[in-house]
């Protein structure tokens, strides 16, 4: 009973700290969006009403939409929590990466280039401790179970080259969609798994 009481006290303590962090995040987002004008188009409907277990305690989608004028959650694999993490790590101005190749190279999601004497010694992607890369890899694994174009891409590659390389390739594809949405205003619409497989 004593051990259970200690565990419950710690759980309650951490829940209070988490709520304080969420309140601070909401306050910072509100201050960032206060200077922004309202987007012309209304916020699209969410793809899923299912709440993530690690989501913040407030509706973050409207604030992110006002901040970026793009609904990043329309990209499969990117939920409200991941969109918040991507923006907190990369910012809203992706022009510091001149191209999407620079961005994916920074994430260590592009093939390596160990070449000596014209012979390719290794094309493995570099190891990284980048938090964005870890989140994108997890998103790639989850999107592989969906009936979407990205899910069909994941399954096709997994059957051909194995799961490890497929996770990297799908994470890179999600990163490219995120970069194009933030830099060029890409409005992503999923064509569906059937369309991808027919092509």
Image (cartoon, rainbow, N blue to C red):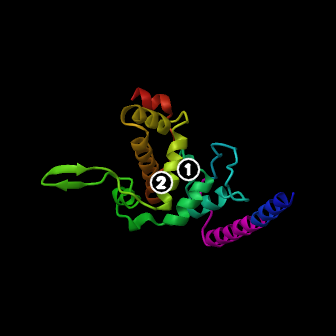
Q: Position of residue 114 (x, y in %)?
A: 24, 55
User: Can you see residue 163?
Assistant: yes
Position of 67 with respect to 149 (left or right) is right
Q: Residue at x 55, y 53 (%)?
A: 72
Q: What distance separates the C-alpha of mark 2 from that of mark 1?
A: 9 Å
Q: Residue at x 43, y 54 (%)?
A: 180
Per the image, is 172 magenta?
no
User: Can you see residue 39?
Assistant: no
The local crowd at label 1, few if under 14, some if 14 to 19, many if 20 or more residues have their Cα within 10 Å, is: many
What residue is disc 2 on? 178
Depth check: give the residue in front, 4 or 149: 4
The local crowd at label 2, few if under 14, some if 14 to 19, many if 20 or more residues have their Cα within 10 Å, is: many
Q: Are marks 2 and 1 in contact (CB under 8 Å)?
A: yes
Quadrant housing residue 64 = bottom right
- Is residue 190 shown above or below 109? above
Q: Position of residue 73 (x, y in %)?
A: 58, 50
Q: Position of residue 36 (x, y in %)?
A: 60, 68
Per the image, is 27 magenta?
yes
Rendered-image quadrant of the C terminus? top left
Q: Position of residue 58 (x, y in %)?
A: 72, 59
What residue is disc 1 on? 78
- The kind of secondary structure element at disc 2 is helix
Q: Residue at x 41, y 59 (%)?
A: 107
Depth check: give the residue in front, 8 or 104: 8
Rendered-image quadrant of the N terminus? bottom right
- The kind of secondary structure element at disc 1 is loop
Q: Which residues are magenta?
A: 16-41
Depth check: give the residue in front, 92 or 107: 107
């Amino acid at each position: 009973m004593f051990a259970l009481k200690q565990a419950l006290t710690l759980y309650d303590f951490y829940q209070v700290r988490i709520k304080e962090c969420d309140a601070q995040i909401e306050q910072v987002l509100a201050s960032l969006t206060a200077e922004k004008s309202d987007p012309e188009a209304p916020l699209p409907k969410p793809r899923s009403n299912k709440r993530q277990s690690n989501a913040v305690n407030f509706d973050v989608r409207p604030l992110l939409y006002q901040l970026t004028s793009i609904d990043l959650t329309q990209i499969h694999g990117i939920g409200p929590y991941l969109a918040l993490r991507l923006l907190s790590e990369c910012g809203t101005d992706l022009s510091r990466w001149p191209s999407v190749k620079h961005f994916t190279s920074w994430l260590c999601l592009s093939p390596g280039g160990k070449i000596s004497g014209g012979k390719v010694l290794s094309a493995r992607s570099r190891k990284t401790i980048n938090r964005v890369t870890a989140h994108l890899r997890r998103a790639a694994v989850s999107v592989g179970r969906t009936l979407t174009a990205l899910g069909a891409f994941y399954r096709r590659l997994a059957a051909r080259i194995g799961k490890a390389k497929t996770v990297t390739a799908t994470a890179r594809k999600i990163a490219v969609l995120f970069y194009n949405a933030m830099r060029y205003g890409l409005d992503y619409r999923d064509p569906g798994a059937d369309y991808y497989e027919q092509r």
